[in-house]
Image: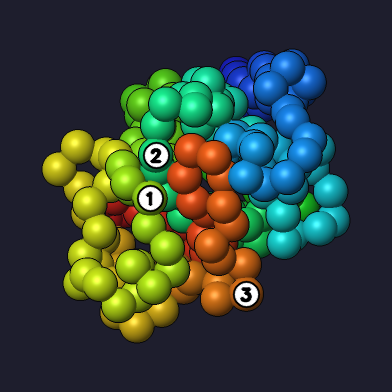
Amino acid sequence: MRRIVLLLVGLTSVFALTATAAYAGIGGTGKAADRTIADVVIASGGEFDSNHRDFDILLNAVIAADLAETLSSPDINFTVFAPTDLAFVKLAKNLGFEGAGEEEAWTFLVGALTELGGGDPIPVLTNVLLYHVAPERLTIDNVLFDSDSIATALEGASFSVDRRALVDNDPDIRDAKVSLRKSNIRANNGMIHTIDRVMLPIDL
């Protein structure tokens, strides 16, 4: 048990240090039209705090999965469905987490992903994140009115759209909903829509 705790602490420390380095290296300022998807997420995320409406956990997850460079490329055109910190805390609670803090929830999720990944959390984390990315630029109207399902960057995986709900592959956990007030966040390489829960490509 002690070895597992030390492993989780070590993984969390590595992820946090990597995220801090990337935050310093690829962050940008200026108008949204001049920023990449990664820049927009970084501008609204960073260190763990008490603000559950931003993207601190998402930023740490993106860096840990080594997707920051991809999302900062001007040569792509993606749509990202971005879970807030509260969305990740809700997922952690669905999986048994009893706390409330962002860092504690992230540590718990790293442990859950490590177990699901047979000792390596990164492949599972990467799949979950890719499930939140559509390989084309979609406005909120495109999402809600133009299709019953949306293909994702995770090969062979899609989610359904039911009004504002994004129906994933876990029937037991409440589906994510798109925030109408925090959608159509434009970047020069795509679009971001804020969602209130983490979508799952598999039935946990």
User: Alpha-carbon distance for marks 2 and 1?
Assistant: 6 Å
Give the residue displayed 57% in from the left and 45% down from the top: 187
In what element is the residue under mark 1?
Answer: loop
Q: Is residue 122 above or below residue 193?
A: above
Residue contact at pointers 3 and 2, CB within 8 angstroms: no
Image quadrant occupied by the N terminus: top right
Hey, what amino acid is under mark 2? Asn
Rendered location of residue 66, percent (x, y): 50, 21
Hey, what amino acid is under mark 1? Arg
Judging by the rendered image, the residue that carries numbered circle 2 is: 77
Judging by the rendered image, the residue that carries numbered circle 1 is: 137
What is the number of the mark on residue 9?
none
Give the residue displayed 62% in from the left and 67% down from the top: 182
User: Alpha-carbon distance for marks 3 and 2?
Assistant: 22 Å
Rendered location of residue 21, percent (x, y): 74, 16
Earlier sequence position, callout 3 versus callout 1: 1
Residue 40's quadrant in the figure? top right
Q: Residues within 10 Å of mark 2 (few under 14, many from 20)?
A: many
Query: Which of pointers 3 and 2 indicates the residue nearer the eye?
Result: 2
Residue contact at pointers 2 and 1, CB within 8 angstroms: yes
In the depicted view, which residue is nearer to us: 1 or 104?
104
Judging by the rendered image, the residue that carries numbered circle 3 is: 181
Rendered location of residue 160, percent (x, y): 24, 67
